[in-house]
Amino acid sequence: MNNDIDGAIGAALKDFRLRNGFSARHLAALSGVSGAMISRIESGQVSPSISTLSALATALKIPLVSLFRETTSNYTDYTFVENGAGLKSTRIVDEHVHEYENLAIHLRRDLQFGARIVTLKRQEAIPPVYVGNGVVFVHALEGEAVYGYGKQEFTLRAGDSICVDAEMRHGILSVHTAEFRFLTVQAEVQR
């Protein structure tokens, strides 16, 4: 098991070193870690200390955790949704009703990600506004609507996009056409 981890750390180190265009000698000069030790780490022959890895990460100007990127588990989840096969849902907020189709929901211990296609029909009831965590991306597919972000308002038409910090009040304020369809993607760090 340790050899697998040592090899993964070594492969990541070599990848970052080469991406920066550094020779092992240059990285040694920047980090204070000997060229011989860098070579042994990259070939997976040693288990480097955290202080050694920290010095190398600092020299490469990357987070220390980046050197561990290939040491995670051997499994991952994915979502594949065929055209029209997303999970269809209806949201009711007071008098307002709208439809959406879940395309992806991905949960990791450090990240939550969701993508939906939302269809809003022009109606007298006011659409909901939201405050949350993370970031929200909206891409208009059909129609026209006004999107509010804090005190600002943006008219969205097919092809327009907006990306906002979800911690400020945001959402569709009004629909100008009979129907407004958009793709929304939200990502937030899991705490």
Image (cartoon, helix red, strand yellow):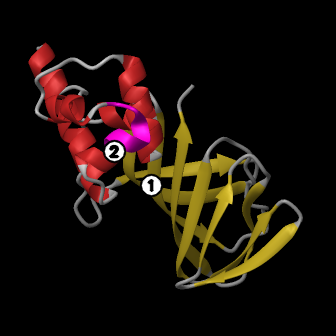
Residue 75 seen from this side: no
The residue shown at (25%, 52%) is: 23
Q: Is residue 111 above or below residue 14?
A: above
For disc 1, the marked residue is 115
| Viewer-proximal residue among 70 and 157 | 70
Whether 99 is among the magenta residues is no
What type of secondary structure mainly makes up the magenta span?
Answer: helix
Q: Does the CB distance between marks 1 and 2 fall below 8 Å?
A: no
| Residue 8 horizontal side relative to residue 20, left or right | left
Nearer the observer: mark 1 or 2; the answer is 2
Whether 30 is among the magenta residues is yes
| Residue 120 horizontal side relative to residue 39, left or right | right
For disc 2, the marked residue is 27
**Residue 183 disc label:** none
Q: CA distance from mark 1 to mark 2?
A: 41 Å
The amino acid type of the residue labelled 2 equals Leu
Secondary structure category for the residue under label 1:
strand
Residue 114 coordinates in the image, percent (x, y)? 46, 48
| Viewer-proximal residue among 29 and 15 | 29
- Residue 82: image quadrant is bottom left
The residue shown at (30%, 60%) is: 21
Q: Which residues are magenta?
A: 27-33
Residue 95 coordinates in the image, percent (x, y)? 75, 53
Residue 131 seen from this side: yes
The residue shown at (32%, 49%) is: 26
Secondary structure category for the residue under label 2:
helix
Q: Quadrant of the N terminus?
A: top left
| Viewer-proximal residue among 24 and 160 | 24
